[in-house]
Image (spheres, rainbow, N blue to C red):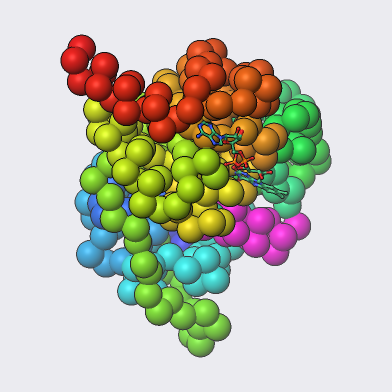
């Protein structure tokens, strides 16, 4: 099956690649490889073997992304496939390509991706078809080449416990998605020009899922998942107007992204894409400031690994103070404007 998909020179490359060989699904947007995928490359490298990147996209998109992928530190080769069916990579249309690539005879031992909404649908889908184990949202891994066992840790119960799980050595192919806050991003310019090969797309003759449109929230602020500073607001912000009027000046002066608790999102103060927590984004910035957020475990699950946590809350018993490095018991409507003023003076 491999010969149908690959061109000849890569067969030689694979033949000289013993030990673990990871295939990393590289997601991209507007010509830029997602940060989560860069963390997935770092995780794949920790297996201790070869790392091949896979870029899938529309005919106009793939070339640029492949050039960037070839320069990623830790990548040994880049496979790519383009088709108009992949312009918006609907997982139902991409999975046949991955399935064919991994069919018996493939050199890959692990398939790795970010724990993104798209990849966490794609990988288990293909794993199930190939009867292989899929472990999601891992925060560390250890591969024993002698026994071919891979052991992972992953948070469970909203991060209140860590499960250690092992993909059995007897199964040659293992899938896992990576929590990006647990692995640093692979450097984008330090690699040594990996080789690349095109794969024939595997087009779905009669797609059952069609992409109609994507509505993206546009913002000039740093992206929540990648920002080094995050200012988050909770239910105490009352409504969308006060949420923005109170938090934006502070975010501006600190060059921070804005986040929100689920209560704030559910009440319509902030967009869904800003939700931090168990059912929102997981972030680990240099500084996370929780403003008018009580600190429910589901919120903590999304931010507790931040390097410095600051909280402003008028209730001294608010649970957020149990994990905050810096806490201010105050009315946010007095404290935040004062903080903005002081920061502007520095
Ligand atoms: P509240 O708990 O109401 O807290 C508001 C805080 O503001 C209080 O501590 C109060 O003292 C303080 N306050 C009020 N007025 C002022 C003022 N003037 N100045 C200063 N402080 C003030 N939540 C998330 O955030 N993210 C998730 O991903 C998430 N996922 C969930 C998944 C499940 C399955 C479930 C069951 C719940 C989930 N939740 C999530 C909801 C979570 O349990 C909490 O309900 C939510 O986090 C509360 O949001 P909050 O802290 O903004 O509101």
Q: Residue at x 36, y 52 (%)?
A: 241
- Whether 89 is drawn above or below 70: the answer is below
| Residue sitting nearer the eye, 16 or 177 | 177
Horizontal side of 278 relative to 21 (left or right) equals right
Would you say residue 309 is visible in this rendering? no
Image-quarter location of ligand 1? top right
Q: Main secondary structure of the magenta part?
A: helix
On the image, the x and y values in percent for residue 29 come to 32, 53
Residue 142 sits in which quadrant? top right
Would you say residue 336 is visible in this rendering? yes
On the image, the x and y values in percent for residue 167 come to 76, 38
On the image, the x and y values in percent for residue 265 come to 52, 53
Residue 299 sits in which quadrant? top right
Q: Residue at x 31, y 33 (%)?
A: 251
| Residue sitting nearer the eye, 31 or 311 | 311
Q: Residue at x 52, y 41 (%)?
A: 236
- Give the quadrant of the C terminus: top left
Q: Which residues are magenta?
A: 118-131
On the image, the x and y values in percent for residue 75 come to 39, 34
Q: How many marks?
A: 0
Q: In the image as oriented, which residue stretches furthest toward the left? A: 345
| Residue sitting nearer the eye, 333 or 61 | 333
Residue 275 drawn in magenta = no
- Give the quadrant of the N terminus: bottom right
Q: Residue at x 54, y 27 (%)?
A: 313
- Whether 11 is drawn above or below 45: the answer is below
| Residue sitting nearer the eye, 342 or 122 | 342
């Amino acid at each position: 099956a491999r010969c149908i998909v690959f061109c000849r020179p890569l067969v030689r490359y694979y033949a000289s690649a013993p030990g673990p060989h990871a295939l990393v699904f590289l997601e991209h947007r507007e010509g830029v490889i997602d940060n989560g995928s860069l963390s997935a490359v770092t995780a794949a490298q920790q297996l201790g073997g070869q790392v091949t990147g896979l870029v899938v996209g529309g005919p106009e998109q793939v070339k640029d992304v492949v050039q960037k992928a070839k320069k990623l530190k830790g990548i040994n080769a880049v496979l790519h496939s383009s088709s108009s069916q992949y312009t918006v990579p609907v997982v139902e249309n991409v999975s046949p390509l991955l399935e064919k690539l991994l069919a018996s005879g493939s050199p890959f031992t692990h398939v790795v991706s970010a724990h993104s909404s798209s990849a966490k649908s794609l990988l288990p889908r293909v794993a199930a078809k190939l009867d292989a184990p899929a472990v999601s949202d891992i925060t560390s891994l250890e591969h024993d080449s002698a026994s071919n066992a891979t052991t992972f840790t992953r948070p469970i119960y909203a991060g209140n416990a860590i499960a250690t799980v092992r993909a059995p050595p007897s199964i040659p192919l293992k899938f896992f998605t990576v929590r990006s806050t647990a692995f640093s991003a692979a450097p984008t310019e330090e690699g040594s020009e990996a080789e690349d090969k095109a794969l024939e797309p595997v087009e779905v003759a009669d797609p059952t899922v069609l992409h109609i449109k994507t509505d993206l929230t546009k913002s000039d602020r740093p992206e929540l998942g990648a920002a080094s500073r995050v200012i988050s607001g909770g239910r105490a912000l009352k409504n969308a107007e006060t949420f923005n009027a109170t938090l934006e000046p502070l975010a501006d002066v600190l060059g921070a992204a804005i986040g929100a608790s689920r209560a704030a999102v559910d009440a319509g103060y902030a967009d869904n894409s800003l939700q931090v927590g168990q059912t929102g984004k997981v972030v680990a910035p240099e500084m996370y400031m929780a403003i008018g957020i009580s600190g429910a475990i589901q919120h903590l699950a999304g931010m507790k690994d931040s390097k410095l946590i600051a909280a402003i809350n008028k209730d001294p018993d608010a649970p957020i103070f149990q994990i905050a490095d810096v806490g201010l018991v105050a009315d946010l409507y007095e404290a935040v404007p004062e903080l903005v003023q002081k920061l502007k003076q520095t």
